[in-house]
Image: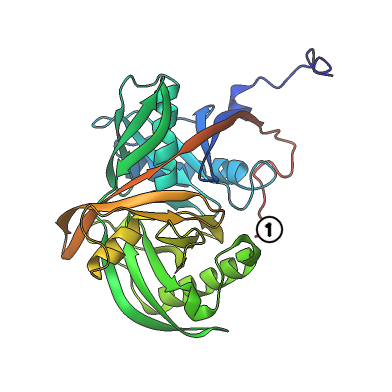
Amino acid sequence: MTQLFDNWNWPTRDSNRITAIEMHTGGEPLRVFVSGLPRIEGKTVLEKRRHFSEHYDHVRKGTMWEPRGHADMYGAVITPSDDADFDVFFLHNEGYSTMCGHAIIALTKLVIETGLVQKAEISFNVPAGRIEARADLKDGKVVQSSFRNVPSFLYLRNQTVNVTGLGVVSFDVAYGGAFYAFVDAANLDLGLGPDNLHKLIDYGRRIKHSVIAEFPIRHPFEYDLSFLYGTIFTGAALDSSNHSRNVCIFADGEVDRSVSARAALHHAKGELALNEKITIESIVGSTMTVAAVEATRFGDYDAVVPEVSGTAFITGKSEFYFDPDDPFREGFILR
């Protein structure tokens, strides 16, 4: 059976073929493009992201959306950098994000294990700023990756918003490379397990759009970063050895495992000391560890530098073809 298609004439036109390495961190997928992308112009990572979104957004749709992707697919475009090891920006079902911890953890593993770098400490420029990552190695294999995120801070404390169908919802907004609204799941009688996935997505979307409608979000320095990225529901851990569980609903209903802004939120509220590590569960039970390792100022805000650790795995390699006659060559999304 394995030889049935050996002599088939596979498509070879480079303009119609994109190759990617498939990975995951704690179950969160990452599709890293390694060949076939068009030339991306720009000196900074924000300029590169803007050029890609203006000229090649069909590539994002074609690789993130069905039939090549799915509603929770996530991607990374990694390029050479003038002042770091790499520039990288991120793709998802709705557009482009500013920072992604699970992607940095995975990319650290990828660039080391594929031989792109010959060291254990890596610097990445992302849309939110500069990220310093490092790898723990055993027999040449990355067994864990860690990174220090951009300065993170509590933006809105103890606010309420009226959400259609839910009533008045209490929330905070914190920044950890992106802005998130934090909601205690218990206040909504909302479990944080896979059986509640659709309700979590529904509630997360509603809360996000209600907060956007009433509360302006302004990054201290960058207009491109001034938006609410998602809703993070927090609750008790299922494993008592862990600090808590959270589920992040971002973009157009994607499910994530974000933790950096948690460190900023808890430190600002006096619930997390500097260098105190906490381990946070995801919806599937995977974990990441985070600590606030440095106090700093970021614009007008008291901030911390979070350090996040996690484990990633390489799951495969994909080649995608884009037949000009295919009516769904740019993909579609139903959720």
Residue at the image position 40 percent from the left and 24 percent from the top: 138
Q: Compare residues 154 and 262 and report the one nearer the observer.
A: 262
Image quarter in which the N terminus is found? top right
Residue at the image position 35 percent from the left and 28 percent from the top: 80
Q: Position of residue 239 (x, y in %)?
A: 49, 58
* Residue sticking out furthest to the top: 7
Residue 109, picture quadrant: top left
Q: Compare residues 75 and 321 and report the one nearer the observer.
A: 75
Using a 10 Å C-alpha cutoff, classify the residue at mark 1 as few (fewer than 14 neighbours), some (14 to 19) or many (20 or more): few
Residue at the image position 37 percent from the left and 49 percent from the top: 289
Image check: 199 left or right of 149? right
Q: Is residue 144 visible?
A: yes
Image check: 252 left or right of 330? left
Residue at the image position 51 percent from the left and 45 percent from the top: 26
Q: Compare residues 173 and 215 and report the one nearer the observer.
A: 173
Q: Compare residues 182 and 138 and report the one nearer the observer.
A: 138
Image quarter in which the C terminus is found? bottom right
Q: Position of residue 205 (x, y in %)?
A: 53, 69
Residue wearing tag 1: 334
Q: Amino acid at mark 1?
A: Leu
